[in-house]
Image (tube, coloured by chain):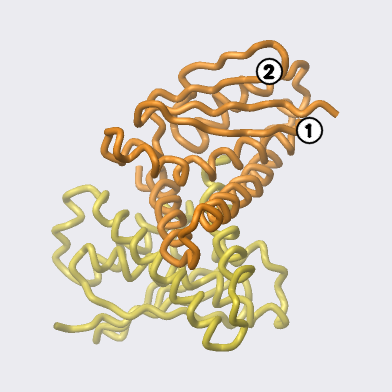
Chain colours: A yellow, B orange
Amino acid sequence: MADAALFEFLHTEMVAELWAHDPDPSPGGQKMSLSVLEGMGFRVGQALGERLPRETLAFREELDVLKFLCKDLWVAVFQKQIDSLRTNHQGTYVLQDNSFPLLVRMASGLQYLEEAPKFLAFTCGLLRGTLSTLGIKSLVTASVAALPACKFQVVIQKA
Amino acid sequence: MADAALFEFLHTEMVAELWAHDPDPSPGGQKMSLSVLEGMGFRVGQALGERLPRETLAFREELDVLKFLCKDLWVAVFQKQIDSLRTNHQGTYVLQDNSFPLLVRMASGLQYLEEAPKFLAFTCGLLRGTLSTLGIKSLVTASVAALPACKFQVVIQKA
């Protein structure tokens, strides 16, 4: 119970810390903090990817890897699965979480929408890092239409 | 399995991030980063403390609270218990962990001893924050004699 909350509390503190000491509140400074968070997520994702059971390293299809992220990775980190996974079958995947744990504590309402990217950057990196360990290069972005739902878009980079 | 490692990976990234962007490598700058980590630990500890089952809020004795930290808090965060708890019965407690998870990955050897404080500051804050939520004001410091063992000294501040 407490341990499930631990990641969430720690994530909140990281975001607060990066923005509290951010000397540059301009769009450039914001971008820098977001990229720091994304980088931390990437390295945590890489490390988590290395811890995965061996059999998962032999996925036959790209789609199997994405399904694995939606189930196993999400459960390990957020104690729930992604709500839906869609793809255009051309290397773009959209993972939708209808109640994303790192956004749930924010009051819902349009006025908080602009704060949302701070709470998504780490997870974008987490997805990209885990995919990287599984041998897939990707670009991951996130968007929010109505809190606390959000979408992560994964675009596979073909070699 | 992966979720148990998540806290550890994230903690490693926080430490790395704070030291990578630390513009001031002087003892003063080091102290600043340590106090940032301690502060993050404090707030996470406070939040974890609030999540504790209600019955634990009615501890009869100070010693019961300390035992609770050694068992329940440690298991929630580190998946193990503290190895020993000693007290002088005058408000000073020494919690010894013979194999502290956040130090285990460091190679053992005297040459790494000076790096150890970075990996203990968050946990000092965690103890102080959890105690604070349970109504006890304290000072918490840590020391390492031989990696990966360490001691946390809790000194209760009487009102």
Quadrant location of the C terminus of chain A? Answer: bottom left
Disc number for residue B135: 1
Q: Which amino acid does label 2 sit on?
A: Asp
- Few, some or many C-alpha atoms within 10 Å of disc 2 (few <14, some 14-19, many ≥20)? few
Examine the image and state in which quarter residue A88 appears: bottom left
**Residue B109 position in % (x across, y down):** 27, 33
Residue A21 left/right relative to B98: right
Name the kind of residue labelled 1 in the image: Gly
Q: Mark 2 points at which residue?
A: B64
Residue B128: x and y in percent read 66, 37
The mark nearer the N terminus, 1 or 2, is 2
Quarter of the image containing the N terminus of chain A? top right
**Residue A116 image point, x, y percent:** 59, 76
> In the displayed structure, would residue B25 be above or below residue B159?
below
Q: Dot 1, crowdedness within 10 Å: few (<14), some or many (≥20)?
A: few
Which residue does the image show at 62% across and 20% down from the upper left? B93
